């Protein structure tokens, strides 16, 4: 296989990983939206700092296990969590 073929094959692998990444994000948001509805129904706060801290610690540990920069992985998940919290806050406002 020449380098052009290898490059194309690697790009196809990246595309497949990106698809799985988006599918996993969609699954995570389906779950967190249910969590948001439950929190709103029960009058619970939309943000749980302790839970977020536990998730960050776990993600950083996993990043190290997979030889990834833990700060980068934490930043990516922080962006996801920030969006989730925003959705939970919106759900709380919509509840009567």
Image (cartoon, grey):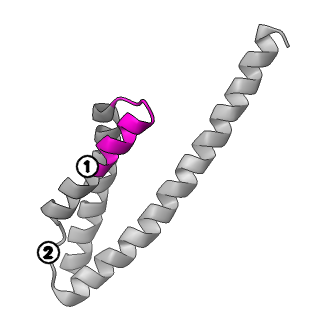
Q: Quadrant of the C terminus?
A: bottom left
Give coordinates of residue 87: x percent, y percent: 29, 66
Q: What's drawn in magenta, residue-wise?
A: 58-69
- Helix, strand or loop at label 2? It is loop
Q: Which residue corresponds to the image point at 20% horizontal and 89% vertical from the top-left?
A: 42
Q: Is 28 on the left-hand or right-hand side of 49?
A: right
- Whether label 2 touches label 1, CB < 8 Å: no
Nearer the N terminus, badge 2 or badge 1?
A: 2
Image height check: is 21 above or below 63? below
Q: Which residue corresponds to the image point at 54% horizontal and 50% vertical from the top-left?
A: 22
**Residue 96 visible at all:** no
Quick one: which residue is furthest to the top in this view?
2
Q: Which mark is residue 14?
A: none
Q: State the predominant SS element of the stretch in magenta.
A: helix
Examine the structure image and report whether residue 63 is included in the region drawn in magenta.
yes
Q: Is 89 on the left-hand or right-hand side of 60?
A: left
- Helix, strand or loop at label 1? It is helix
Label 2 vs label 1, nearer the camera: 1
Examine the structure image and report whether residue 93 is included in the region drawn in magenta.
no
Hey, which quadrant is residue 70 in on the image?
A: top left
User: Which residue lies under the disc numbered 1?
Assistant: 56
């Amino acid at each position: 296989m020449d380098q052009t073929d290898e490059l194309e094959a690697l790009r196809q692998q990246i595309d497949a990983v990106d698809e799985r990444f988006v599918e996993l994000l969609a699954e995570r948001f389906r779950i967190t939206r249910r969590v948001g509805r439950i929190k709103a129904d029960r009058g619970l706060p939309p943000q749980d700092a302790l839970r977020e801290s536990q998730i960050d610690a776990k993600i950083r540990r996993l990043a190290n296990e997979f030889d990834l920069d833990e700060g980068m992985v934490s930043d990516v998940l922080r962006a996801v969590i920030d969006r989730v919290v925003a959705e939970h806050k919106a759900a709380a406002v919509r509840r009567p």
